[in-house]
Image: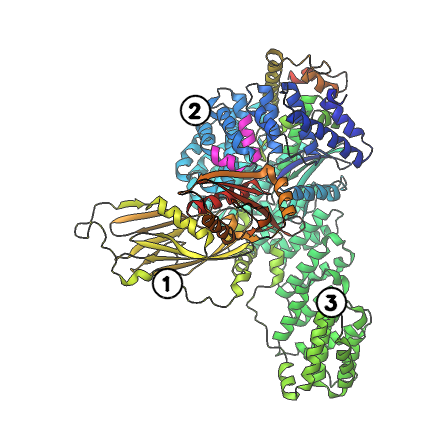
């Protein structure tokens, strides 16, 4: 029972991260986005985390201003999906160190890399936080090695390396390396 | 300045945009900038390339159309540097769609990463992207490699778990790409892996495989139960895989889900049954609400899966477990926690559907609790409660449940009303204690929520009333409708029912005081100005019937007919004219025509139930709950619906003229089979394919002609007659035995393809289990096909049969290609050139050599071919050596607005010496390729 899609959307209805695990046309995607904007974002905390409409079913979870929405099959185990979402959030949290929406906005590319480490083809691929973090740290290390040894981009443009550029969007006191050394 | 802006600035800018227009302007500017960078001759640095691709991804994620940069993505994927590769793969997963022409270019890079590389990280990236991108091209090209990675002894757990999921994605798209029998041993190897991550992925794969071929994987049950008992009973698992102190809840859930495919499991008497029982009991008894919501969710997720498993096992399972499960569900549907209540209601409805007897009695005791949930603030819970009430309803409680539902309907919000109305209508009909109660219920529905009462609901009332002429139902309904319509405020739907009923059965009450024909007429006519044209039509017919019955009101009705003669509504105009003239044709004819309606054919499935069924359709795995119980109302209805499906439009035509005898050569004695019968060989010899060139040429011929021979040799002849209209086609196959001995196991195998929706009519069973074909006998098969997606590959057809000496197997292709579903379009030069330019990026081109130099006569043949393939010629753009045309491929798929999707196709054939250059440009790259191939094939056959 794979997800059809996983979308991160802000309370204001802006897509922050989206991955579709099924082939959708653009109009399908718009329909899904509208459905989430109209029927999911308005739900109160006391309501359950599942909603169905016109053959679509989503399981969602809200973290502060950010909604994590998984489009699922009708016979999917909903509570398991809820915890899969939470697992993903915990991994993001561990990686970014107390993750907030801004982290995901400015590091959407990293968030994607993590997303694809945790979910493959709409299935949870890694259910261990430690294991996932380790894999992501390995990936980061590879990127950095490549940047240092072969790909000297530090002199280009405004004088910042690719990784440094990424860090600009972060709040100044935090360093990515801190959270990576788990 | 703009050049120096990094990704972060771009994101900041978009965040700070004051309006949507602002944002869109900023994005357009950036996209234009990137486009110019990409097209500029100088090569980009690695840093720039990555940065621009990320910007594209970001813009794409926000919903902007990004239709360039694919080449850069491809080059990043092919890069030797990991940092570039990573960007490339993520961008590819997001930007590239199935059917993208770039897919073919990228395949080799991916293959290298998959098998050529010793680098785990690259292999992982490749696997993830194949799994996420879903291109059928990728799947076809790489599934062998993916399988190899999965079963390779050297693969690390990280690679293996991804490979399993990647393969799963693959078998969802190409279900037959894995031979189950060969693959099962690999799965059992994987199930002995100790890595929980690998096990979890393997279980996902196994569930996918099992949903298609459960028998082949039955041997995995002991492994699954063993792992389950380790997790549940021993609670032994690496600490990494404890989730809030629960040993990998996800793996537990998958194991249980897998076992649900074997509902007879508990009755099998195997040793592992006891272990499984112990596991289930432990899960049921030990799960408790925890202070951590996450722990509680995880545990309950397992618990609900266990309950579902028990539900599936049903009476063949353990009675104590069943009771315990029921007790828990009873508790859950009254708890405060909304998720638990929601799931409790849902699971209970499954239970009610599956086992109709004891469980249902128990479920019925919860009626008041469920009714309470019907008033919940949360629409999800309300829907579930409605569903459960619907399935727990039977003769004994129908009246009370329907009453409850109607009471609640008054207060229900729009989101759920339509559903409720439909369900009430179905229940009222199905479990009616009396027909009068049924009619009253529907009338209540109309008065409370008339707008949601679909036409099919009140049509049903008419059918039932018309078909029950024995008791006093018709009179009762006539009286009721008279009363309802007497009120000025009657709902338009009530007026429609009233018009029909009074027109048909009004005479039954016309003798009663105050209900004479004239009064009945007045009662209806007062609504005239307020009702829609449809209802006016129905009322007009009622007037005609009254006109026939009551002479005294003819003078009143005549002017109405006369006035409507000039109505703007064509239907009303026609009806009034016809009815007016009817009066002048003499009493017998009028009486004959306006006689009471005969009883309706009740064989048909109620359209209401069909409507209900349409709610659930979008599921990948075959749903265990529907599949396992052939008696469940859902599956019964499903199968009936399939039979009753309206036939495609083209079948409405009169019977086709007798088929031209494709097997005309029957009078000649067939050639004697080679070998002779005296000494039959020990084993049957296998023959496949005749002459490939001949096969290709017959196929090509059939692409532009409606009928002909698809294949023939001394044994068998396969003829085709085809007819297409829009997105639909009817293809008749005639397969005849040309030999002197009977064929056994004669089969026409047509593998299902995702892009065609097909229905097959086959009296002899040649497409199913196979049949016997005597000499000179012909098997006929009719295929109704509808294109539902763009495609290029013609679907396959394999003809297999056995004679006493030989097994024959001929893989052929059916001539159902994209051009089959094409309709010609005529455009002028400007429009053609305009479209031609726009579609430049999606072209498909090939140069072919023909046997002789192209001369004007041959160009004429080409032009004829173009028309034969249903393309409209666009002569204005042609020189003597070119030929261009335009068509539109119709598909039955619907876009967001419900309009059928068509693909515009342009094609241009240029001659040069003994060569043709064929160029097809369509909206869809796959179709371009298909169109090009079709044209190449027919040109080669010229």
Chain name for mark 2: B
How is the rendered protein coloured?
A: rainbow
Task: Give the vertical position of B388 relative to B556 (above or below).
Answer: above
Give the SS element for disc 3.
helix
Q: Earlier in the sequence, mark 2 or mark 3?
A: 2
**Predominant SS of the magenta segment:** helix
Which-is-in-front pick, marks 2 and 1? Answer: 1
Chain name for mark 1: B
For residue B661, which numbered disc appears in the image? Answer: 1
Q: Residues within 10 Å of mark 3 (few under 14, many from 20)?
A: many
Chain name for mark 3: B
Give the SS element for disc 2.
loop
Q: Earlier in the sequence, mark 2 or mark 1?
A: 2
Which-is-in-front pick, marks 3 and 1? Answer: 1
Real-space CA distance between mark 3 and mark 1, rounded to the nearest whole angstrom: 55 Å
For residue B583, which numbered disc appears in the image? Answer: none
Quadrant of the image for the N terminus of chain B? top right
Residue occupied by mark 3: B493
Q: Are marks 2 and 1 in contact (CB under 8 Å)?
A: no
x, y (%) of residue B736? Answer: 34, 58
Q: Which of the two residues, B817 or A60, is positioned nearer the viewer here?
A: B817
The segment highlighted magenta reads B125-142
Residue occupied by mark 2: B153
Left or right: A102, with B153 as reference point: right
Q: Earlier in the sequence, mark 3 or mark 1?
A: 3
Real-space CA distance between mark 2 and mark 1, rounded to the nearest whole angstrom: 59 Å
Task: Give the vertical position of B46 relative to B822 (above or below).
Answer: above
Task: Looking at this view, name the residue that lies furthest to the left.
Answer: B678
Give the SS element for disc 1.
loop
């Amino acid at each position: 029972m794979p997800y059809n899609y996983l979308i991160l959307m802000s309370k204001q209805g802006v897509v922050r991260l989206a991955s579709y695990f099924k082939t959708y046309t653009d109009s399908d995607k718009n329909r899904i986005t509208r459905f989430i904007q109209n029927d999911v974002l308005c739900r109160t905390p006391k309501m359950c985390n599942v909603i169905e409409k016109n053959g679509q079913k989503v399981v969602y979870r809200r973290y502060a201003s950010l909604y994590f929405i998984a489009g699922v099959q009708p016979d999917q185990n909903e509570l398991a999906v809820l915890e899969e979402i939470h697992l993903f959030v915990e991994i993001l949290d561990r990686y970014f160190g107390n993750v907030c929406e801004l982290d995901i906005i400015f590091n959407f590319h990293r968030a994607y890399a993590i997303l694809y480490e945790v979910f493959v083809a709409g299935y949870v691929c890694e259910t261990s936080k430690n294991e996932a973090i380790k894999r992501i740290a390995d990936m980061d290390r590879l990127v950095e090695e490549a940047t240092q040894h072969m790909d000297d981009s530090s002199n280009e443009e405004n004088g910042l390396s690719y990784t440094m550029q990424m860090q600009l969007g972060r709040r100044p006191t935090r360093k990515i390396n801190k959270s990576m050394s788990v | 300045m703009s050049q120096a802006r990094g990704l972060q600035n771009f994101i900041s800018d978009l965040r700070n945009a004051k309006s949507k227009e602002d944002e869109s302007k900023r994005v357009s500017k950036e996209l234009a900038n990137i486009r110019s960078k990409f097209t500029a001759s100088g090569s980009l640095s690695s840093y720039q390339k990555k940065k621009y691709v990320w910007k594209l991804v970001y813009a794409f994620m926000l919903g902007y159309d990004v239709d360039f940069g694919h080449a850069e993505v491809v080059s990043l994927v092919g890069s030797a540097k990991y940092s570039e590769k990573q960007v490339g793969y993520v961008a590819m997963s997001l930007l590239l769609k199935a059917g993208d022409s770039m897919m073919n270019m990228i395949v080799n890079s991916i293959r290298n990463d998959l098998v050529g590389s010793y680098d785990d990280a690259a292999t992982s990236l490749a696997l993830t992207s194949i799994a996420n991108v879903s291109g059928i091209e990728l799947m076809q090209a790489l599934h062998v490699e993916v399988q190899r990675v999965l079963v390779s002894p050297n693969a690390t757990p990280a690679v293996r778990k991804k490979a399993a999921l990647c393969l799963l994605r693959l078998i969802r798209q190409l279900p037959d790409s894995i031979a189950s029998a060969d693959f099962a041993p690999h799965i059992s190897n994987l199930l002995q892996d100790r890595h929980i991550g690998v096990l979890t992925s393997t279980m996902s794969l196994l569930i996918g495989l099992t949903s298609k071929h459960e028998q082949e994987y039955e041997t995995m049950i002991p492994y699954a139960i063993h792992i389950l008992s380790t997790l549940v009973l021993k609670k032994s698992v690496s600490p990494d895989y404890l989730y809030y102190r629960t040993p990998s809840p996800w793996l537990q859930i998958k194991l249980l889900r897998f076992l649900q495919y074997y509902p007879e499991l508990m009755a099998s008497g195997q040793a592992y049954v006891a272990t499984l029982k112990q596991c289930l009991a432990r899960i049921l008894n030990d799960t408790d609400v925890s202070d951590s919501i996450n722990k509680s969710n995880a545990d309950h997720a397992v618990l609900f899966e266990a309950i579902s498993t028990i539900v599936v096992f049903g009476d063949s399972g353990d009675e104590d477990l069943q009771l315990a499960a029921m007790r828990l569900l009873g508790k859950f549907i009254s708890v405060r926690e909304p998720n638990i209540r929601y799931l409790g209601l849902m699971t209970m409805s499954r239970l009610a559907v599956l086992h109709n007897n004891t469980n249902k009695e128990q479920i019925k005791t919860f009626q008041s609790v469920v009714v309470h949930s019907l008033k919940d603030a949360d629409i999800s819970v309300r829907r579930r409660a409605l569903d459960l009430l619907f399935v727990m309803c039977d003769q004994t409680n129908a009246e009370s449940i329907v009453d409850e539902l109607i009471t609640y309907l008054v207060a229900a919000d729009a989101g759920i009303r339509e559903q409720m109305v439909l369900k009430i209508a179905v229940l009222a009909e199905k479990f009616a204690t009396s027909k009068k109660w049924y009619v009253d219920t529907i009338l209540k529905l109309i008065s409370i929520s008339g707008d949601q009462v679909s036409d099919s609901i009140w049509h049903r009332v008419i059918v039932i009333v018309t078909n029950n002429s024995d008791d006093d139902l018709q009179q009762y309904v006539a009286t009721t409708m008279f009363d309802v319509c007497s009120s000025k405020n009657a709902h338009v739907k009530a007026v429609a029912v009233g018009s029909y009923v009074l027109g048909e059965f009004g005479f039954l009450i016309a003798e009663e005081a105050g209900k004479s024909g004239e009064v009945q007429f007045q009662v209806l006519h007062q609504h005239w100005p307020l009702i829609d044209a449809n209802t006016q039509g129905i009322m007009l017919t009622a007037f005609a019937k009254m006109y026939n019955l009551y002479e005294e009101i003819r003078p009143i009705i005549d002017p109405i007919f006369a006035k409507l003669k000039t109505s703007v509504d064509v239907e009303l105009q026609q009806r009034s004219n016809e009815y007016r003239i009817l009066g002048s044709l003499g009493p017998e004819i009028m009486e004959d025509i306006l006689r009471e309606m005969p009883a309706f054919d009740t064989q048909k499935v109620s359209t209401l139930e069909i409507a209900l069924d349409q709610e659930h359709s979008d599921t990948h795995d075959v749903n265990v709950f529907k599949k396992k119980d052939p008696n469940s109302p859902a599956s019964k209805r499903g199968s009936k619906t399939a039979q009753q499906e309206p036939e495609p439009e083209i079948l409405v035509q009169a019977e086709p003229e007798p088929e031209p005898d494709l097997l005309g050569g029957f009078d000649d004695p067939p050639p004697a089979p080679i070998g002779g019968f005296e000494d039959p060989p020990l084993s049957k010899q296998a023959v496949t394919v005749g002459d490939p060139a001949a096969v290709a040429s017959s196929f090509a011929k059939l692409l532009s002609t409606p009928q002909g021979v698809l294949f023939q040799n001394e044994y068998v002849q396969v003829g085709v007659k085809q007819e297409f209209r829009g997105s639909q086609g009817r293809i008749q196959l005639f397969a005849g035995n040309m030999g002197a001995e009977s064929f056994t196991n004669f089969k026409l195998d047509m593998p299902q393809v995702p892009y065609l929706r097909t229905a097959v009519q086959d009296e002899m069973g040649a497409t199913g289990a196979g049949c016997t074909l005597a000499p000179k006998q012909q098997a006929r098969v009719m295929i109704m096909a509808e294109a539902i997606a763009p495609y290029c590959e013609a679907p396959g057809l394999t003809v297999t049969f056995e004679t006493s000496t030989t097994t024959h197997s001929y893989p052929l292709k059916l001539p159902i290609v994209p051009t089959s579903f094409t309709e010609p379009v005529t455009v002028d030069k400007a429009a053609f050139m305009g479209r031609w330019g726009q579609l430049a990026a999606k072209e498909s081109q090939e140069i072919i050599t023909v046997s002789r130099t192209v001369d004007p006569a041959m160009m004429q043949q080409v032009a004829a071919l173009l028309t034969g393939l249903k393309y409209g010629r666009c002569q204005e753009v042609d020189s003597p050596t070119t030929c261009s045309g335009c068509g539109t491929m119709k598909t039955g798929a619907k876009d967001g607005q419900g309009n059928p999707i068509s693909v515009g196709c342009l094609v241009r054939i240029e001659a040069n010496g003994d060569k043709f250059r064929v160029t097809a440009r369509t909206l869809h790259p796959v179709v371009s390729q298909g169109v090009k191939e079709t044209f190449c094939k027919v040109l080669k056959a010229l």
